[in-house]
Amino acid sequence: MIGVGIVGLGLAVKPHALALRDLEAAGRARVVGGFAPSADRRAAFAAAWHWPAFDSLDALLAAPALDLVVILTPPRTHLPLAEQALAAGKHLLVEKPVEWDAARAAALADAVTRAGRRAGVVFQHRFRPAARRLKAVLEDGALGRVLSASASIRWWRDDAYFATPGRGTKARDGGGVLLTQAIHTLDLLLHLAGPVESVMGMACNSGLRAVDTEDVAAAALRFANGAIGAVDATTVARPGFPERIEIAGTQGSAVLVAERLDLHVAGRAPEVIDHGSAGGGGADPMAFDHGPHRAMIAEMIDAVAEHRAPANDIATGLLVQRLIEAWLRSSATGRAEAP
């Protein structure tokens, strides 16, 4: 049984805790405890989940039978926390983005390789049943050659969301809608359609929030496989709508709206997989089912037990982060940029 510790007990902890509670009940994992610098958050964590709360990271890392550390802190803290956990011989699961910028993210991935540990990044949208089905269809060639792959992320975040000190700022989060919200759908788009060769992007701040990052963005993409597509992303679309990915190939097309997939393959009856289309696009960013988190953590546990890289290996998280940085460079230069 894999022992799991959680570092960072803020907004992101709930779906991970729900998933780990399920995995504990199934005999797949044992939660050793959690740590946060805030005494109030430690107390709230212990009261809500009935797991130990440690008053220092060193104490958590020294706990018996700890194998995997889940890091849920703000992006710029990921690298030093990961280095400390790796030095203690632990495996990692790191909340997105991997780090504050692509250079620090690459440094974290390199540290994992040097330590000989396993590390995954929290991109749970890959583990939604509908997304898994679409990935399988694309891999077996049922849609033929991909010609077009596009995405739309039209979300809403209210004033309460931005009331957390530093949220939405470059200094704390590293970026705005692209790095903090749309990154999940952008990662899934790359996971399905492959890497991007070039991006022509635009991004701006709406002025609705006192932040220094973009909350409205759009881009044209050219994929390495020759497909082209368009992406738009925002957190000013009140009241928030389900994220959407559309893929068209030579033999069919697919529309993925949150956890609903409509699949149309030549010569086959249409296929629909519907696990809901609410997502976390509205004012409550945590209004989603924790099932994909459970599947993601279970995969990570299997990777540790089987001494292999996880399906969501942390190195794959670098692709979307490099795309986002190229997008923002393109917005600044007015030229197409390569990730």
Image (spheres, helix red, strand yellow):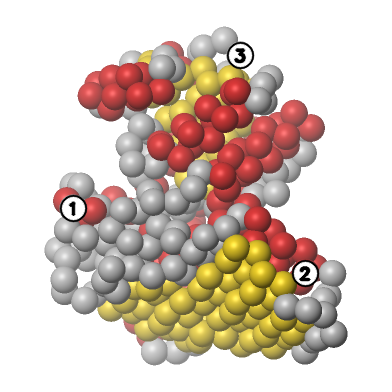
Mark carried by residue 137 = 2
Residue 139, quarter of picture: bottom right
* 12 and 114: which is toward the camera: 12
Image height check: is 141 above or below 119?
A: below
Q: CA distance from mark 1 to mark 2?
A: 40 Å
Mark 1: few/some/many CA within 10 Å (<14, 14-19, 20+): few
Q: Secondary structure at mark 2?
A: helix
- Report x, y in % for residue 89: 61, 24
Going from N to C along the chain, the mark reached first, 3 or 1, is: 3
Which residue is most to the top? Answer: 64
Image height check: is 29 above or below 277?
A: above
What amino acid type is highlighted by mark number 3?
Ala
Q: Which residue is mark 3?
A: 65
Mark carried by residue 160 = 1
Q: Secondary structure at mark 3?
A: loop
Q: Is residue 20 visible?
A: yes
- Report x, y in % for residue 176: 32, 64
Residue, x 58% and y 71% (percent of image)? 256
Q: Secondary structure at mark 1?
A: loop
Residue, x 43% and y 72% (percent of image)? 153
Tell whether 136 sits left or right of 233.
right
Mark 3: few/some/many CA within 10 Å (<14, 14-19, 20+): some
- Report x, y in % for residue 49: 41, 23
Image height check: is 80 above or below 318?
A: above
Q: Are marks 1 and 2 in contact (CB under 8 Å)?
A: no
Q: CA distance from mark 3 to mark 2?
A: 40 Å
Going from N to C along the chain, the mark reached first, 1 or 2, is: 2
Mark 2: few/some/many CA within 10 Å (<14, 14-19, 20+): some
What amino acid type is highlighted by mark number 2?
Val
